[in-house]
Image (tube, helix red, strand yellow):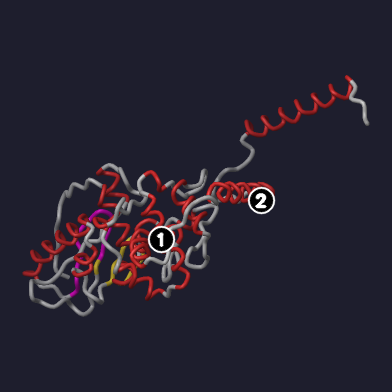
Amino acid sequence: MPIVTRKSLSTAVLLVLVLALLYLGFLWSGIYNVGADDPHTRPMLMMMQTLRQRSIHARSRGLDVPDLKDPKLILKGAGHYAAMCTQCHLAPGIEESEIRPGLYPQPPELSKTRVDPRDAFWVIKHGVKMSAMPAWGGSHDDLTIWSLVAFLQKLPDLSPAQYTDIVARAPSDEDMDGGGHHHHGGESDDHAEGHHGMPGMAMPDAGQAPADDSHMHSHGSQAPAAIDGLSAKAVPAAEAVAEAFHVALKRGDREAVLALLAPDVTISEGGTTQSRAEYAAGHLGEDIAFLKDAQVKPLSLGSMPM
């Protein structure tokens, strides 16, 4: 059995002090780049991944899982997923988003992987430190979070058309406990108008069919848009429909919003163009969620024939 001498003990204490000073010096120096566009070193990445996985699993393993095959629960989760998750985790038919390329680590594409229900519930409710994953438990009850988990079990099996269909049939935010908050809650009027463009639209006079090659445009917070082939006398009706469109968004009435969009409408927003189905499956939920809490003060509304 080795004998611990005073000299060996002093050496050990000195080594610990030196290592501690080196560690503190490393932290204070700022030499490690925390920028999201500079990946972790391999040792740091392995340590963080292991820590995250073990921490989540240790805290989620005792959870009681409800019936995740309940159709109503799945349908409710579809609406919340479209409103809360597509910008980071994408969806069938949604290949990229504006925010996702800048995220590190990259969020998993949840339509391409099946997640453990208990782990998924814990992560959605509590979030993950130093990542883009928020703790939705602060604004959503457990039943709402379980509805998301239920939908995640079905998501990998959905085609783009099936995803669009189930999201279109999801209940409106007014019918959902907890609402569909996304990344825009609590923003001021000025910031809200510049940060998140609400689609506007223009339609012909009542009773007049929409033009075949219709286009809906949105730029920043401007509501006006145009449909090809409008006459000058259609302009007042266009403004009225634009106002009705925004009222329906604010009310969270998905059916009313979609009823105001022609089947072949194209929506230009944020530098991308979407079809009616793509908008219904993705950004529509975000627009509804944004307007649910935002206080918007319209400054002007105008339209012109094309």
Mark 2: which secondary structure? helix
Residue plotted at (25% across, 52% down):
291
Q: How many dots with numbers?
A: 2
Query: In this rendering, would 293 be left or right of 4?
Result: left
Location of residue 150 in the rendering, given as x and y in whole percent from the top left corner: 42, 62
Residue plotted at (12% across, 62% down):
239
- Whether residues under marks 2 and 1 lie with C-beta atoms below 8 angstroms apart, the answer is no
Location of residue 288 in the rendering, given as x and y in whole percent from the top left corner: 27, 57
Instruction: Tell me the quadrant of the picture where the N terminus can be found.
Output: top right
Mark 1: which secondary structure? helix
The answer to whether residue 146 is magenta is no
Amino acid type for the residue under numbered disc 1: Thr
Front residue (pair 190, 5)? 5
Magenta stretch bounds: 217-228
Q: Quadrant of residue 260?
A: bottom left
Front residue (pair 196, 91)? 91
Residue lying at the far left of the rendered structure: 233
Residue plotted at (35% across, 71% down):
164
Q: Name above or below for residue 193 compared with residue 151.
A: above
Instruction: Tell me the quadrant of the picture where the C terminus can be found.
Output: bottom left
Residue lying at the far top of the rendered structure: 6
Identify the disc placed on residue 86: 1
Query: In this rendering, would 110 be left or right of 7?
Result: left
Query: In this rendering, would 290 be left or right of 147?
Result: left
Location of residue 88 in the rendering, given as x and y in whole percent from the top left corner: 45, 57
Identify the disc placed on residue 251: none
> For the residue carrying disc 2, how many other residues have a C-alpha within 10 Å: few (<14), some (14-19), or many (20+)?
few
Q: Quadrant of residue 246?
A: bottom left
Location of residue 115 in the rendering, given as x and y in whole percent from the top left corner: 52, 61
Residue carrying label 2: 46
